[in-house]
Image (tube, helix red, strand yellow):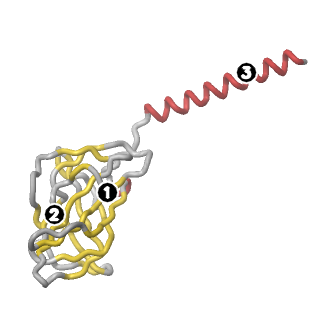
């Protein structure tokens, strides 16, 4: 009897180790969904340091664990702003080096700047929608960031940069 229990325990332990090893290998080999897809990341807007004549708001993108890193380039496009669900009639331009490429994914947040003229004619906003760009072009879908900020005519969006 003692030998059978020992044998059963040894076989059970071996099967458990094999199953764990197989699960780890499957996870490592499976293609995880891209963090660049709008449904796979979070975006938040917060006030940043002002500069001469401008207000700045930082849009930070983070990706939860389980998503594959991806590459982003340039400024987001098709940027729209809204307040309480109502779109604001404003078109944002872009500024800065549009050729830079950054890696984004779990543990690798990225950010971009919303630069607003501080001319006393700003409108409150609480949401920005945008299309992220990869080195090969637009990433399908619309990302959305939330947070209190303001916009005005002449608002510009900077390129995506590494870090929060």
Whether 11 is drawn above or below 65: the answer is above
- Residue identified by numbered label 3: 11
- Residue identified by numbered label 2: 157
In the orientation shown, which residue stands out farthest toward the top?
3
- Relative image position of residue 23 (x, y in whole percent): 55, 33
Please tell me which residue is depicted at 31% across the width and 56% down the height of the picture. Answer: 61
Q: Which badge, 3 or 1, comes first in the chain's sequence?
A: 3
Whether 79 is drawn above or below 137: the answer is below
For the N terminus, the quadrant is top right
Relative placement, left or right, of 4 versus 76 is right
Q: CA distance from mark 2 to mark 3?
A: 61 Å
Q: CA distance from mark 3 to mark 1?
A: 47 Å
> Which quadrant of the view contains residue 82?
bottom left
Relative placement, left or right, of 141 versus 113 is right
Q: Give the secondary structure at mark 1.
A: strand
In the orientation shown, which residue stands out farthest toward the right?
1
Please tell me which residue is depicted at 17% across the width and 72% down the height of the picture. Answer: 55
In the orientation shown, which residue stands out farthest toward the bottom?
121
Q: Give the secondary structure at mark 2.
A: strand
Of the numbered discs in the image, which one, if any, rests on residue 118? none
Q: Give the secondary structure at mark 3.
A: helix
Callout 2 crowding tier (Cα within 10 Å): few <14, some 14–19, many ≥20 = many
Q: CA distance from mark 1 to mark 2?
A: 15 Å
Q: Marks 2 and 3: which is nearer the front?
A: 2
């Amino acid at each position: 009897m003692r030998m059978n229990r020992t044998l059963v325990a040894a076989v059970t332990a071996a099967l458990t180790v094999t199953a764990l090893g197989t699960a780890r290998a499957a996870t490592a080999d499976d293609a995880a969904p891209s963090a660049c897809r709008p449904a796979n990341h979070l975006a938040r807007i917060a006030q940043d340091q002002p500069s001469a004549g401008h207000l700045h708001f930082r849009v930070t993108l983070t990706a939860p664990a389980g998503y594959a890193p991806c590459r982003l380039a340039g400024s987001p496009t098709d940027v729209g702003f809204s307040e309480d669900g109502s779109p604001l009639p404003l078109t944002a331009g872009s500024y800065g080096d549009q050729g830079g490429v950054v890696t984004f994914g779990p543990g690798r947040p990225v950010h971009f700047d919303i630069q607003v003229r501080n001319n006393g004619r700003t409108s409150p906003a609480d949401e920005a929608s945008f299309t992220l760009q990869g080195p090969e072009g637009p990433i399908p879908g619309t990302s959305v960031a939330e947070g209190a900020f303001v916009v005005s005519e002449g608002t510009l969006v900077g390129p995506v940069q590494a870090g929060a």
